[in-house]
Image: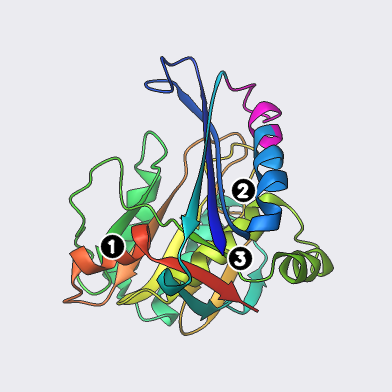
């Protein structure tokens, strides 16, 4: 039996509401790993560089085997850039190479640049027209309920590539689920961690393209855009992103 373990932590709110988001994590693990996963999430919440959370919520939930689907991990490649403008040019080229129209690629990048605050979820954008399709304002559409199918093997592989940190490990799993979504053409992302400037363009056609510099150091605003085929059923798409449990195989 598998279990979903989710953690979110915040600071300065009341009963977890209205505070500043500090950290979040989610894993899907076998029963024997539930306890250690909960403990390591608690530690992560309390020792986060954004501060020590005063509210931590951990949720453990059984996942029936029948509810799990599988997809393959995206192949990873890297584009080295040295500043934000170069990173954005590279991202635009990668989005177009993945099948996003030049107009939508520019709109996607501009939408993230225009954010004043980080979004918890993603903007869903028509890959042809650049029109925003989700009606979820600042919340966007969260991609949730995914993990690697074999954590030990995955972590060893990422460490072997020099990518042992939380950001690339979690992002590659998420990007793999997104790329297999019903209608995904590409994804654009940069982090909301002020100390983390690397982002990526993911796509079913070319895989996970890390772009080493996508924003200025110290900038706390990040987000994601999911570009979808013209005519995609957005309700179905949101349901897949938020609710479908996906394990990613190497
Ligand atoms: C990478 O290092 O491969 C990019 C990671 C992006 C992290 C996005 C996030 O923090 O949510």
Quadrant of residue 78 in the image?
bottom right
Side of 161 where 46 appears, left or right? left
Q: Helix or strand or loop: what does disc 2 sit on?
A: loop
Side of 161 where 146 appears, left or right? left
Q: Sort mark 1 into few (<14), some (14-19) or many (20+) by Cα contacts within 10 Å.
A: few
Spot the residue most to the right: 160
Residue that label 3 marks: 210
Q: Mark 1, mark 2: which one is toward the viewer?
A: 1
Depicted 229 relative to depicted 4: above or below: below
Q: CA distance from mark 3 to mark 1?
A: 27 Å
Depicted 5 relative to depicted 133: above or below: above
Q: Which label was assigned to residue 197? A: 2
- Magenta stretch: helix, strand or loop mostly: loop
Q: State ligand 1's quadrant.
A: bottom right
Residue that label 1 marks: 239
Q: Which residues are magenta?
A: 43-53
Q: Looking at the rendering, in which quadrant would you find the C terminus?
A: bottom right
């Amino acid at each position: 039996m598998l279990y979903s373990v989710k953690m979110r932590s915040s600071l300065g709110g009341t009963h977890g509401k209205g505070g500043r988001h500090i950290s979040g994590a989610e894993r899907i693990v076998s029963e024997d790993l539930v306890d250690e996963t909960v403990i390591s999430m608690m530690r992560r919440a309390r020792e986060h560089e954004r501060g020590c959370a005063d509210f931590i919520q951990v949720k453990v939930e059984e996942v029936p085997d029948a509810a799990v689907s599988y997809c393959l991990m995206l192949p990873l490649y890297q584009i080295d850039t040295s500043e934000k403008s170069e990173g954005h040019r590279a991202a635009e080229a990668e989005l177009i190479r993945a099948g996003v129209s030049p107009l939508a690629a520019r709109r996607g990048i501009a939408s993230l640049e225009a954010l004043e605050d980080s979004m918890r979820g993603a903007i869903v954008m028509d890959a042809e027209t650049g029109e925003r399709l989700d009606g979820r304002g600042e919340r966007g559409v969260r991609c949730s309920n995914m993990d690697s199918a074999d954590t030990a093997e995955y972590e060893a592989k990422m460490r072997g590539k020099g990518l042992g940190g939380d950001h690339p490990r979690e992002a590659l799993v998420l990007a793999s689920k997104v790329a297999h979504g019903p209608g995904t053409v590409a994804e654009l992302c940069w982090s909301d961690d002020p100390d983390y400037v690397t982002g990526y363009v993911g796509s079913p056609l070319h895989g996970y393209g890390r772009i080493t510099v996508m924003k200025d150091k110290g900038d706390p605003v990040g987000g994601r855009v999911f570009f979808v085929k013209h005519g995609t059923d957005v309700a179905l798409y949101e349901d897949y992103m938020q609710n479908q449990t996906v394990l990613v195989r190497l």
